[in-house]
Amino acid sequence: MLTVNSEIQFPKAFVAFFASAFSRSLQNPEQVTIDPMLLAVFAMRVLTWMFFVGLVGSAVVVLISFWEDGKELFGKD
């Protein structure tokens, strides 16, 4: 068993499985970078962009609805 901070114990199989994903191993726990993180960062940027496009689209729908309701309420029939 590998002991980190004398409280957490990791089985050797767990460490062997995840050690390849870390560019620095558990000898330096203060600074660990993950190589496949670039894909995750790209996905987060795309999702952020999609969120704000959806937010703008929703604002446009609200403005159109407000305009149409105003015409219906105050317009001549």
Image: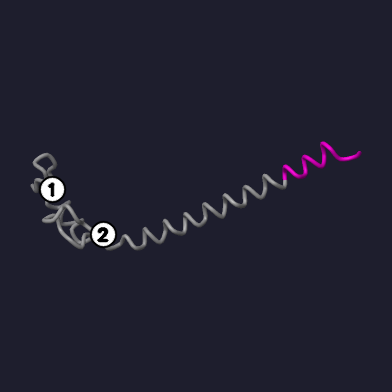
What is the quadrant of residue 66 in the picture? top right
Question: In the rendered view, would you say 61 is above or below 74?
Answer: below
* Residue 73 in picture, x, y percent from top left: 82, 36
Q: Which one is in front, 22 or 56?
A: 56
Rendered image: mark on residue 54: none
Residue beneath disc 2: 34
Q: Position of residue 55 (x, y in %)?
A: 57, 49
Asked if residue 18 lies in the magenta stretch, the reply is: no
**What's the residue at 24%, 59% (across, down)?**
33
Mark 2 or mark 1: which comes first in sequence?
Answer: 1
Mark 1 — residue? Answer: 11
Whether residue 8 sits left or right of residue 55 in the image: it is left
Kind of residue sitting beneath label 1: Pro
SS class of the residue under badge 1?
A: loop
Query: Would you call the spot at circle 1 few (<14 residues within 10 Å), some (14-19), or many (20 or more)?
Result: few
Q: Nearer the viewer, residue 15 or 67?
A: 67
**SS type, badge 2:** loop
Task: Report the residue at 17% width, 61% height from top.
Answer: 24
Q: Which residues are magenta?
A: 65-77
Q: Quadrant of the C terminus?
A: top right
Residue 38: x %, y % from top left? 34, 63
| Label 2 to label 1: alpha-carbon separation | 20 Å
The relative height of residue 7 versus residue 48 in the rendered view (above or below) is: above
Which residue is farthest right?
77
- Looking at the picture, which amino acid does disc 2 mark? Ile
* Crowd band around label 2 with a 10 angstrom C-alpha radius: few (<14), some (14–19), many (20+): few
